[in-house]
Amino acid sequence: MKILLVLVLSLAAGSSVAQTRDNAITVYASYRDGGSFTDVTSGNQLHIEASGAASVSLDLKLDKSRQLQLYLSRQNSQMNTGQASAPTPPGGPVPMKVPLRMTYLHIGGTSFLEGRIGQGAYLVGGLGATLFEPGLDGFENELRPSINLGIGYQLPLGERVALRFEARGYATLVNSTSGVFCSGGCVISIKGDTVTQGEVQLGLSFRY
């Protein structure tokens, strides 16, 4: 009888531990597209090229179906400046493609539609900032407010590991009529209102 009681208590304790594994760290690989700026002089669009991106999220349990999420994502891409107007002296020649790194840092959350953290479809979103880092002399970094919204599906692979399939959209408020990235004298003049991007991503989630 005592042995049976010990076994029952052990199983209950194990079940309780399993139920508390509603926090997670997830690493993502994604393919992201979209986004552009406008050349002030010509009015031509300077598109951000599609490329891969890498992200990581920390998800902390709020209740049985929702998590608080801290989300960091980085994309190394290029801005196509082939349609930009010729630089004004003493600006030198502008390369056809300018390296552009974009980093999103957002705080938000996930809400599982089936009512239980860790499995099934969920909604995700967050608010924060985007850091633009152009790789061209005469340009400076820009930090702007941004938002992301998405939908995903989590497929458990075991007690601690799961796959996440997600589609997210991003919107960054640039709100500049001229002089984005300018540092003193601009090589070329660029403006922008809202930069929008979309992506699909695959994540590997470690629950604890």
Image (cartoon, helix red, strand yellow):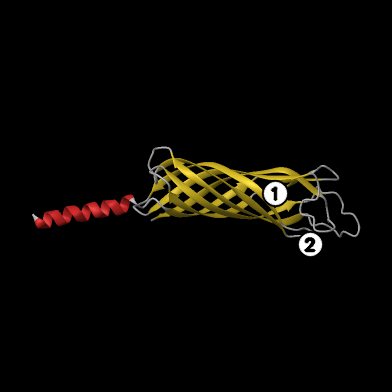
Tell me if 163 is positioned left or right of 13 in this view.
right
Type of residue at label 2?
Answer: Asp
Query: Which residue is identified by label 1?
Result: 48
Query: Which residue is identified by label 2?
Result: 137
Q: Quadrant of residue 193?
A: top right
Tell me if 14 is positioned left or right of 60 in this view.
left
Quarter containing the N terminus: bottom left
Tell me if 62 is positioned left or right of 89 in this view.
left
Q: Residue 88 in the image: x percent, y percent?
A: 90, 54
Q: Residue at x 60, y 55 (%)?
A: 74
Q: Nearer the viewer, residue 82 or 39?
A: 39
* Crowd class of label 1 (few under 14; some 14 to 19; many from 20; radius 10 Å): many
Quarter containing the C terminus: bottom left
Q: Nearer the viewer, mark 1 or mark 2?
A: 2
Type of residue at label 1?
Answer: Ile
> Tag 1's secondary structure?
loop
Q: Residue at x 21, y 56 (%)?
A: 10
Q: Nearer the viewer, residue 197 or 141?
A: 141
Q: Residue 180 in the image: x percent, y percent?
A: 77, 51
